[in-house]
Amino acid sequence: MIALSNLIAHLEALAPLPLQESYDNAGLLVGFPQMEISGAVVALDMTEEVVLEAHQKGCNLVVAHHPIIFGGLKKINRKNYVERAVWTAIEKKVALYAIHTNLDNVREGVNDKIADRLGLENRQILAPKKNQAGEPLLHQHKQTGAGLIGKLPKPLPTQDFFNLLKKAFHLHFFKHTALCHETIEKVALCGGAGSFLLQAAKKAGAQAFITADYKYHEFFDAENQILICDIGHYESEIFTVELLYDYLKAQFEALPIYPTQVRTNPVFYY
């Protein structure tokens, strides 16, 4: 067995906690650094079902992208899904670690995994972070920040681009704005809710912007200049599980590590 602090050190080498956004709550949510870890389950969400899955597999750690404790927790009475997950984690002695917007803001993180699915080349951070002096904030000699932009290996007719999206992200359907380009080559993207990056995508010359959680009136902001594709929050980020599994398995070959088998997406389609 290894100390939880050792595993956390490797996760924070990949995505340092100071790179998370100010509103976020990444890091160790339940547990203590000196715990010995018997195994880990990696997931997108740390629901009660995922905690129980970890316990049943003999694992006492869940590493997930989304933190279950986000806006504060004043009571733990099992009255909602957040309280139930935390209660069960404490009861079963399962530690919870979230690696959220800090993983969004690094290369080789969430957005690079999305870009991998599309085969994007010449990738750059869409909205780079800067230090107090206005200089690019680097991690492992690379820029940090939100979103990503790159080019497809070759321009695709819009219909072929749509087919690529459906295949790459296992989509039955997705929402998009009016077609405004005959072909798509330069693509901007942001895992999860990324509407705040639309202007940056336009400025960078993207012909398409892939993200999720777009509201009705926000679609008007495309202004017939860019193709917005809302593929769904879960659908855009689910491959983060594969990213975390591969990374941790490479660091800790002898530690039992499992990708979750629980479908945590609360959205269903009919």
Image: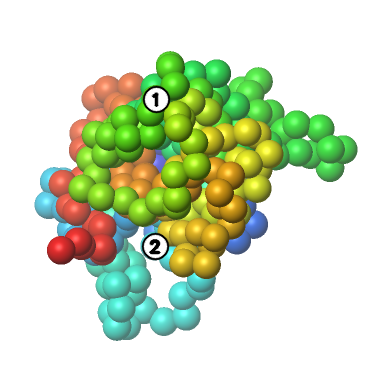
25 to the left or right of 144: left
**Placement of 264 over or under 251, stated as above or below:** below
Which amino acid is tagged 2? Ile
56 to the left or right of 16: left
Q: Nearer the viewer, residue 89 or 53?
A: 53
Which amino acid is tagged 1? Leu
Q: Position of residue 46 (x, y in %)?
A: 31, 57
Q: Quadrant of residue 253?
A: top left
| Closer mark to the observer between disc 1 and disc 2 | 1
Q: What residue did someone put label 2 on?
A: 68
Q: How many marks?
A: 2
For label 2, the crowd category at 10 Å Cα-Cα, with few meaning under 14, some 14 to 19 and many 20 or more, is: many
Disc 1 to disc 2, C-alpha distance: 39 Å
Q: How is the image coloured?
A: rainbow
**Placement of 37 over or under 50, stated as above or below:** above
Q: Position of residue 143 (x, y in %)?
A: 65, 28
Query: Is there any visible trace of residue 182 in the rendered image?
Result: yes
Residue at x-position 60% and y-position 27%: 124
Q: Quadrant of the C terminus?
A: bottom left
Q: Position of residue 175 (x, y in %)?
A: 36, 54
Q: What residue did someone put label 1 on?
A: 156
Q: What secondary structure is found at the residue carrying circle 2? A: loop
Q: Nearer the viewer, residue 255 or 181?
A: 181
